[in-house]
Amino acid sequence: MTGKPYRLATGGSRIDRSKPISFSFDGKMLPAFAGDTVASAVMAAGQRVMGRSFKYHRPRGVVGLGSEEMNALIGVGVGARHEPNLRATQIELFNGITTVSQNRWPSLTFDVSAINNTLSRFFPGGFYYKTFMWPRAFWKHVYEPVIRHAAGLGKAPEERDPDTYEHMHIHADVVVVGGGIAGLTAAEAAAAGGVRVLLIDENPVLGGIADITAGKIGDVCVADHARAVADRLAALPNVQILSRTTAVGHFHHNYMMALERVADHDPSLLANGAPRHRLWKIRAGHILLATGALERPIAFANNDRPGITLASAVRGMVERYGVAPGTNGVVFTNNDDAYLTAIVLRKAGVNVRVVDSRARPQGDLVQRAIAEGIEISPSSVISKVEGNLNIKAVKIAAYRKGQGRVITEQKVDCDFIAMSGGWNPALHLWCHNGGKIKFDDTLASFRPNTHTDAITAIGAANGTMSVAETLSEALAAGEAAAKSVNAKAKASKIKLPAIEEPSRGALEPLWFAPATGGYNEGNKHFIDYQNDVTAADLELAQREGYESVEHTKRYTTFGMATDQGKTSNLNGLGILSEATGKSIPEIGVTTFRPPYTPYSFGAIAGALTKDLFLPVRRTPIFQWHKDKGAVFEPVGQWRRAYTYPTAGEDKHAAIAREILAVRNKVGLLDASTLGKIEIKGPDAAEFLDRMYTNMFSTLKVGKCRYGLMMNELGFLTDDGVTVRLADDHFLMHTTSGGADRIAAWLEEWLQTEWTHYKVFVTPVTEQWAQFAIAGPKARELLQKLGPDFDVSNEAFPHMSFKVGRLGGYPVRIFRISFSGEMSYEVATPANLGRGLWDAIVSAGEEFGLEAYGTEALHVLRAEKGYIVIGDETDGTTTPIDVGLDGLVSKKKADFIGKRSLEQSFLKGPNRKQLVGLLTEDPNEVLPDGAYAVREVKDKPPMDMIGQVTSTYLSPTLGRSIAMALIENGRARMGETISFPLDGGKVVKAKIVSPVFYDQDGGRINA
């Protein structure tokens, strides 16, 4: 810290000096102007230190200008509205805002954990892989508590978030990401073609870095040109502009997500009901990436000290906020762009000199700097920085490319450093969904190469660094994008004005600035600032055998901080290249993953909080059930009718009445909750063959088949009837509680293992109301409803399917049964469900129709011996165990779980197998889950041989029945086994077939 104010007397295009405000930083009130950021205002007040690094707790200041900032992470707000880990360079100030630094105790200037820096020799890269292994007993009581206490940067709020968040879905013909001169030009060209354009930019003001770019476009500066184009775009009806919006990820089929910070900058918006954040879910016809480029630091000794900033960030602080980084500085560079920073500083009255690693720097900006009287030291590097909380001086050493050590050096007093190691195209969004990149020797960086999606990189994001070339490229790309989504799109007819810009000399890569003594080992040449990864750490990883860059990344944590390696990745690759003698392309790159920048959990959740976090799902017939006095039970997220007791009737009597109605007359069940997933595509049949144990490619159109699904271990995970609607179109039914899980399971295999399959998986459970009409009079009831199809047994046999109209409603009707009776499941669009239900109820009166609930359904299926996943299975149950090995195909080459099912222990004779049970006392109902034992003893433990899975009092049979998984059960038919219960009671039951009713299936096929 210096304590000196660094607000310049003039300048600052983003601030309004007529609107002074104040804010709190670490409990101290500081002055600012409307338009300031936390970074600019704190620097203006003379404070350099804004954070501490993660591992060594070294003092850190601002490095970047925007989302690349990795040091100055700030907590904003108090109480429930506190949000940690925000970048000081992007936090817009308003009067009274409370901000706090992080990862320090008790203060920024004195942090007890800075002792780690003194002990840094003992904490090299990967030390945690070696340190916390011995003694073993230390882990629980010493290592883990210490690590948990040290983990994290900011502190999350503990109170409930009072703000709202929302999701928005949008389709756009052309999406332009980035509002700099490339993005603005491309958006205007695309909009001129008449297509819908969405322009996204993370900054509050469009223009990108136009305001700190040298040159003229026509008769105006680059910034004025950008403002004019932005104003024209804002007036166009087919253009939507989202500022303060960051594109956080690009996914399959040009799907993109973007976070809009709606009200962070203005609390009055929150007070008026605006959401705090909005997550946009965007489907784009064509994407134009104009995300610009990120300036990279230079690795030199103590290059992390507060006051060492990227040259473009220094320029931005002066031009946008009227803030000087100090009074006497050094610009350290290997390229011409940093000379513009030196010129801007000199014109602002700040003393500055340039240190350039190149032997013969050339270009217009170099000449302008000389004309301004700026001292230039070519063939030189900074070999050391002196100072801790403030920079006091630097040592400048002579340098030539390939030089390993400093020979001579000169000490120069200064209080800040502006560094520039070149520019890296912002490739993150390009790479999120498989975009390929290539190394450009001119840029000494990677740039976009090929992509399978309709996506085009333009401007600096494409490695195009000149203004003239950027505008030409953007204009052509905008017109081409419009044509790609609409062949009739008009040409833009935009004419580019004459462009003046300074010529630039070639960049010379500088990955490691040599130093003196121990510093030349690189243990203070920081590559990843936030995680304290140094050049020495990367070299150590190579010596220890971590040759893959991905392994090096994980061993050292380089590129794994909250900035996702925006400023560190390429420098790290340069260090590895020099350490191994391989070229950077041979080293390779780490994987860019979403999100581009972190975003709030509130935005991810959107409105799905509180009562909507896990919404109660109700069928279209819910109100009817409620009006009839139904007792409800939860089934997954659904509320289903358990039974319908009438006046003076208890639940047991109601259930018995409903069961007998199905067995003797006709019953009606609301089965809308049944999971329904449509599977469509040329590979759908083959896909189902792999997912199910039995064959579905042989299923004929219009037919149904019951299928079993296993996980990779060979254990049952779901079952249901699948219908073939067309050659390439199937409807899969799943358990009510498993629909979402199974849909995700199918997608997982399609997206990770069988990516070549052309298959779409679409959950449609809520799109259909579905009812089971079951009982011996079911066909008569259907006939009365006037179907436009033949319902005779010959024309409509069991396990077949029809499409038509019933009672005047469009239906899909399946002849399938879960009750053991003749049964038809009728599906109609959900909005028509109540109407069809009422029609069925009305038509069924003469047949004695009764609605039945889930408990009656379970008794009916148990009487018939049908299994329920989760009842007759426990996560370790195979098809063989439940007697359904006939549904395990011996013809298919492969399916999920096939290999596991071949393991000997899954076929062993002592496995638990599904059987039926009849208690000696027909009125005795075994408790659900009761344990069967080999021998009853006076007290536990006893040798358990199985457990009851389902147990009921059957009104159909006039006695109790149960199903159980019993060790080697099928070989024990007729044997009586014992079930010890609480209080010393023992119930005996005889092992029988699990099919208690209609064993020949005559009633189903009637």
Image: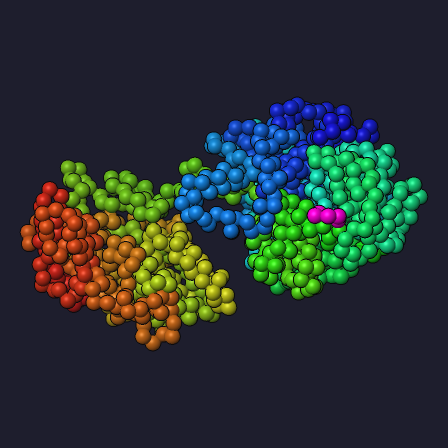
Asked if residue 994 lies in the magenta stretch, the reply is no
Asked if residue 517 lies in the magenta stretch, the reply is yes
**Residue occupying the far front of the picture:** 517
Q: Where the N terminus falls, by quadrant?
A: top right
For the point 73% across and 48% down, the residue is: 517
Q: Is residue 706 visible?
A: yes
Q: Nearer the viewer, residue 782 or 421?
A: 421
For the point 58% across and 29% down, the residue is: 106
Give the x, y percent position of residue 204: 69, 39
Q: Nearer the viewer, residue 587 or 897?
A: 587
- Considering only vertical position in the picture, is 674 above or below 63? below
Q: Nearer the viewer, residue 177 or 345?
A: 345
Instruction: Determine the main secondary structure of the stretch shown in magenta.
Output: helix
Give the x, y percent position of residue 554: 56, 54
- Considering only vertical position in the picture, is 789 above or below 84? below
Magenta-colored span: 515-519
For the point 71% across and 44% down, the residue is: 303
For the point 56% across and 36% down, the residue is: 154
Give the x, y percent position of residue 257: 58, 49
**Residue occupying the far bottom of the picture:** 891
Q: Is residue 843 visible?
A: no
Q: Nearer the viewer, residue 880 or 833?
A: 880
Q: Quadrant of residue 227?
A: top right
Q: Is residue 661 left or right of residue 468?
A: left
Q: Is residue 252 left or right of residue 645?
A: right
